[in-house]
Amino acid sequence: MDNFDDQKLLPIRSNDYIKLNVGGTLHYTTISTLTKVDSMLRAMFSGRMDVYKDDEGWILIDRCGKHFGKILNFLRDGSIPLPDNQHELTELLIESKYYLIQDLIDICENALKKHKECKIMEPVCSVPLIRSKSEESKLLALTNKPAIKLIFNRHNNKYSYTSASDENLLKNLDLFDKLSLKFCNRVLFMKDIVCSNEICCWSFYGNGKKDAEICCTSIVYATDKKHTKVEFPEARIYEEMLNILLYENNKNNFETDIMLATTSSSSNSSGRISANNKNEDKTKEET
């Protein structure tokens, strides 16, 4: 084993180029860089502390070398790009504190504070992209919610669009996003961008079955040419949206409830008719 006590360094000139071995990672730098700011590195390489070389001339520092390159770059330039990862930023802060580089300590602490203030939020809602009819069927079978599907594929058009079509396409998409954010806990929203030949079409589902459909495109003629027209039937979309919410509370018993209500109403009517007939018969007998 090497005896490092016999290899204490004599004072080194500031322009000397030296080799550092920091926890197994190797670095080349100058004394002027290491002593640029008031830190433990300045104390080490200005003669105030003992430093040691191995047999190959590398100055040994018993620290993890993962972030030492960033430490050197900060000493050279006065700034560095900080890690995006909060864990690595914490590691850099620990190394900065060890080497007593106050400016870098302040920068790391401020960055960590911002990380805590801007906590990563979970997505507000999730909208699955439908890639096949079977995927759509599985989603509808697995949910008890009513559902809305938007087919949105501008590239399905064979003709040129009318002047307002692009704007209306965006309005349909924007309304779909707004509805999905507001009703995501009550309605399953799906988006189809690949497995349909339609351009813009809304489908509304209750109890796993399609209840209504609104196609927003049509073919129009202008100067002997066909054009595709995209509309934004906002009122109809809201109307069908409210209609499928009727399935929400009744779930799979919606149709049964309607039948029971109808049957009950019929029974009550029959009962009233029978009672009236009996009263008429009784009146005739008394007469």
Image: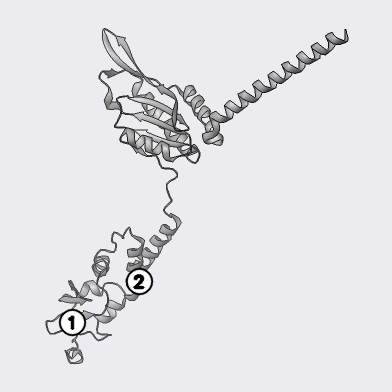
What are the residue bounds of the magenta stretch? 45-56
**Residue drawn at (88%, 10%) of the image:** 286
What is the number of the mark on residue 94?
2
**Residue drawn at (35%, 73%) of the image:** 97
- Alpha carbon separation for disc pair 1 and 2: 28 Å
Crowdedness of circle 2 by 10 Å Cα count: few (<14), some, many (20+)? some
Taking depth in this image into account, of 79 and 283 the one nearest to the observer is 283
Residue type at mark 1? Ile
Counting from the top left corner in percent of width and height, residue 193 is at 31, 32
Query: Of callouts 1 and 2, which one flags the residue occurring earlier in the amino acid sequence?
Result: 1
**Residue drawn at (35%, 21%) of the image:** 165
Task: Determine the image quadrant of residue 46.
Answer: bottom left
What is the number of the mark on residue 103?
none
**Residue drawn at (27%, 74%) of the image:** 64
Question: On the image, numbered disc 1 is attached to which residue?
Answer: 12
Task: Determine the image quadrant of residue 188.
Answer: top left
Which of labels 1 and 2 is toward the front?
2
Instruction: Give above or below for 34 relative to 82.
Output: below
Counting from the top left corner in percent of width and height, residue 264 is at 65, 25
Crowdedness of circle 1 by 10 Å Cα count: few (<14), some, many (20+)? some
Instruction: Give above or below for 221 relative to 5.
Output: above
**In the displayed structure, does residue 271 sit left or right of residue 69?**
right
Taking depth in this image into account, of 70 and 278 the one nearest to the observer is 278
Residue type at mark 2? Ile
